[in-house]
Structures are given as C-alpha cells and as structure tokens.
Amino acid sequence: MSSNAGRVPDDFDTRLRAAAFAWLTSKTLQRTGNLTYSEVQSFIFDGRPIPLKDRVKGIWKPASLSSALSITTTYRPPGVLRPYDDLIHEDDGLLRYKWEGLKRDESTNRSLRSAMQSGVPLIWFFGVGKGVFKPIFPVYAVDEEEENRQFIIDADPAAIADHAEGIAEQFLRRYLKVEARHRLFQAVFRGTVMRAYKGRCAVCRLQHGQLLDAAHIIPDRDEDGIASVVNGMALCKIHHAAFDVGILGIRPDLVVQIRSELMREVDGPMLRHGLQEMHGKRIAVPSARAERPREDLLERAFERFRRAG
Ligand SMILES: [Zn+2]
C-alpha cells in the first residue's frame, strides 16, 4: 500500500477497529459463531476490503494501520486433553502469545508491541478446526517478556479498573483474570463443538445458533469436566437443560433416554415432539472419530442420570 500508511490519523484506527468488532459480532451471531479464512477476508471498511488476519503469520497488521489488528492461534486437533494449557503461565494464570520467529524486531513483533504501547484492542482468532476460527475480542497485549520471547494477552484492563474501586484490588484483579481466561476457553470450546457438530443440536438437529449451547458431558466444575470437544455436545437450550437436570440421558451407545415419569405425562407439543419422541433416538455425532464423545465420560454422565431416577 502507500508509503504514508503509518501516518493515518488515530481516528481511522479507532473507527476501523470498532467497525471490525461490530462486523464480527453480527457475522458470528448466527450459525456456529465461527468464521472461515475467506469469510474473515470479506470485511470492508470505508469502501475498501481490509483483511482481518493473515493467511500464514500469527500477528497481523493491515497496511493502513500502524499497529497490529489481530493475532491467530492455529488449530490443534483433538488427542490432547487440555490442548491450550501451554498458553497459560502456571505462576500467574495469564495468557501468553509467542513472538513471531526469534527476532525481537521482526515487523510483526514490532506491530504487536506498538499495539501494546498504544493500548488498542485486538482480535484473537482461535483455530477451532482446519481453516475455521473463533474470533475473541477485544483482547489487549498488556506486557512483554523478552527473555521468553512472548507477549502477555489479557481481557479489557479498563474493565478491571472499573471494578477495582473500594475492593482489595489485587484479589479482584486475580479473580477477573481467571474469569477472563475462563471466558476465553469457553469461547474456544464452544467454537470447536459447534464446528464439529455442524451447528446442530445432537438430539433434535435444531440448527439455530442463538438457541444452541456447547454442553459439557461432565460439568466443568468437576475435575474431569474438561473444555475439550470429547467432553462436549452441541445441544439446543431445551435439550441442554433437560440433560443437565437428568430429564434426558444419553447412553454410552449414543441412544437418548427420557426419564420414565416424563414419558407418561400428557402436555403440549414441546413435551411430545421435543422430549417424548426423542426417546430411543440415536444422537448425531461428529464425523471424525477423535471428536466424538469419549465413552468413559458418557458412562459417568449416564450413571448420574440413572441414579437421579
Ligand atoms: Zn435439541
């Protein structure tokens, strides 16, 4: 692009980022909430296409901005139970993002450093499938650890400051960081589950994204309640709630069971079509074997369902 690209006014930067966030919000409201690489490239601002991420590089700065706009974490296929644990530092629980290559002054690293210094919000594209991304925003580069060649990424620092008044700030900060990290991983979990289940309820095949949840087979408050696709299922709101309270169970051979008292109840169409008619049906699972619900987790959940009866 033009040689004066770095001299665009700050107002342009602010407007572009705000427009990109609004566009991503509307694009991800429906369906799975994920975007493919080519969808990410279809953003237009002031009549010009502005790519939101690079095809290869992790850190991306459009020519018209003077600092980075997005970072990308490549998809990691299932097999690892906690695939993103290495992004979290065990001492402080904060998220790390590695430099591009080994050189401090690589142009991409400079652009992310510049975003850190000016405090501008970034988009984090998390790979949740091959060429499929869950955008998480806004996030901020809040610090850099040169000896480890990495940046520290965090949720909105202003939000932390807003809440800090009158409370022991250090405890609150820690709490909010844990919360921010939890939200991020839940968003990645949702993106992965929605992609694997093609944005449909495993029980009834409902395909309306706003009515779908990424449900945990073993709840996430449990030690085994991992945020991995093998502990997840895409379920509509009603089947998710029915699963969580033990009205609906899923046998380890993937067959739906409805609580027997409910099978005898007489009520309207939701009970009849939505629940009773699901009894004995097989759930739809991902085509990739490695992404299907893990049998031991289903067994444990089904045992809980049986005991509740
Ligand atoms: Zn459903």
Image: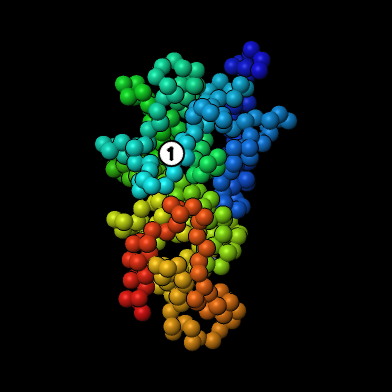
Q: Position of residue 80 (x, y in %)?
A: 36, 45
The furthest residue to the left? 91
**Residue flagged by tag 1: what amino acid is it?**
Ala
Identity of the residue drawn at 39% across and 67% down: 252
Q: Position of residue 115 (x, y in %)?
A: 49, 25
State the colouring used for the structure image: rainbow
Q: Nearer the viewer, residue 209 or 139?
A: 209
101 up-or-down from 88: above or below: above
276 up-or-down from 45: above or below: below
**Can residue 179 be seen in the rendering of this structure?**
no
Q: Nearer the viewer, residue 64 or 100?
A: 100
**On the picture, is 266 further left or further right than 221?**
right
Identity of the residue drawn at 61% across and 21% down: 63
Identity of the residue drawn at 34% across and 41% down: 85
The furthest residue to the right? 47
Q: Position of residue 177 (x, y in %)?
A: 36, 41
Quarter the N terminus occupies: top right
The furthest residue to the top? 3
Pointer 1 residue Cβ closer than 8 Å to ligand 1? no
Q: Nearer the viewer, residue 38 or 18?
A: 38
Query: How many marks are shown on the rendered structure?
Result: 1
Identity of the residue drawn at 42% across and 68% down: 253
Instruction: Say which element carries label 1.
Output: loop
Residue 5, image quadrant: top right
**On the picture, is 88 further left or further right than 186?**
left
The residue that mark 1 highlights is: 155
Quarter the C terminus occupies: bottom left
Q: Position of residue 201 (x, y in %)?
A: 54, 62
32 up-or-down from 95: above or below: below
